[in-house]
Amino acid sequence: MHNLLRSKIIYLLAVILLPSVAFSQMGGDFELNLPDHDEKKFHFGINVGINRSHYHFSFNPRYISPLNDSISRVESINSTGINLAWLVNMRLGEHFDLRTFPLDLVFTEKAFEYRLAKPDPFQDEDSSTIKKIQGITLALPVQIKFSSDRIKNFKVYMMAGGKVEYDFAANAGKKNEKLIKLSKIDYGIEAGIGFHFYFDVFVLTPELKLGWGLKNVHVKDEAIKYSNIIDQVNSRTLTLSLTVE
């Protein structure tokens, strides 16, 4: 699954980037688009993206204990979501920028799959149980961007930073939750690479970004067998986005 996703992303980036890169290297008559764009102290943009996300588990010793004769396997299923954000970029110097997304909404649907060795028919259990968790997250990232020199109407950059997230749909406070509870608040780090393409009236920026959640979002409940075998749950996200400035 990961190899297939990686291949699709590389192909999509190639389709977007190669024609523009080839054009930016052409000789002959050449017009520099938006020559003063990068000299502005602030500039703004609209960001739209797709993401693939899952959770990374750290298990409690009871998961591999001989006394655990119920749950044989737990997996996080990759899910696809969308991002909608508003970019604010502040120029720090010739090659450095500070940027944030003060309105960054992330819509996801994460899923857990449990395999039960001995399902209880009186509890309506099956050998395989999938728990889907809808996510509507408001994120606040702060990033440092390092850019290359501009090559005609093309520029490449790298970025890194941190973020705080609040998930409006998280189920930590639900008393009747029978599988697993997740915290509403998460924080982590992210890093990525992007490309600026300068057109007559706008700058188009495709970006590929990885996110690592640092907070344990698992709200452990010893009374729930699906929860007490897990110690930590950390989010992992891969995002491909386009920004128009």
Image (cartoon, grey):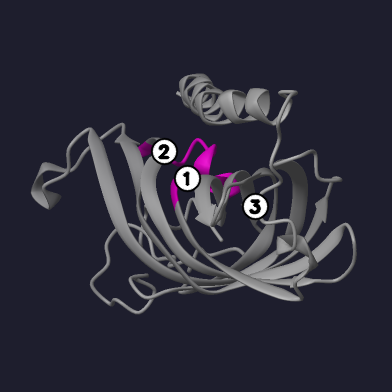
59 up-or-down from 145: above or below: above
Decide which of tag 1 and tag 2 comes sooner along the chain.
Answer: 1
State how far apart marks 2 and 3 are (Cα): 15 Å
Decide which of tag 2 and tag 3 comes sooner along the chain.
Answer: 2
Label 3 secondary element: strand
Label 2 secondary element: loop
Name the quarter where the C terminus is drawn.
bottom right
190 up-or-down from 44: above or below: above
- On the image, numbered disc 3 is attached to which residue? 212
Task: Tell me which amino acid carries mark 2.
Answer: Asn
Dot 1 alpha-carbon crowd within 10 angstroms: few under 14, some 14 to 19, many 20 or more:
many
Decide which of tag 1 and tag 3 comes sooner along the chain.
Answer: 1
Name the quarter where the N terminus is drawn.
top left
Identify the disc placed on residue 54.
1
- On the image, numbered disc 2 is attached to which residue? 78
Q: Residue 149, position in %: x, y?
A: 86, 45
Residue drawn at x 30%, y 36% as measured from the top left: 116
16 up-or-down from 65: above or below: above
Q: Quadrant of residue 121?
A: top left
Q: Residue 51, position in %: x, y?
A: 45, 46
Could one spot residue 214 in this view of the protein?
Answer: no
Q: Is residue 51 magenta?
A: yes
Task: Tell me which amino acid carries mark 1.
Answer: His
Per the rendered image, the range of residues in magenta is 49-71
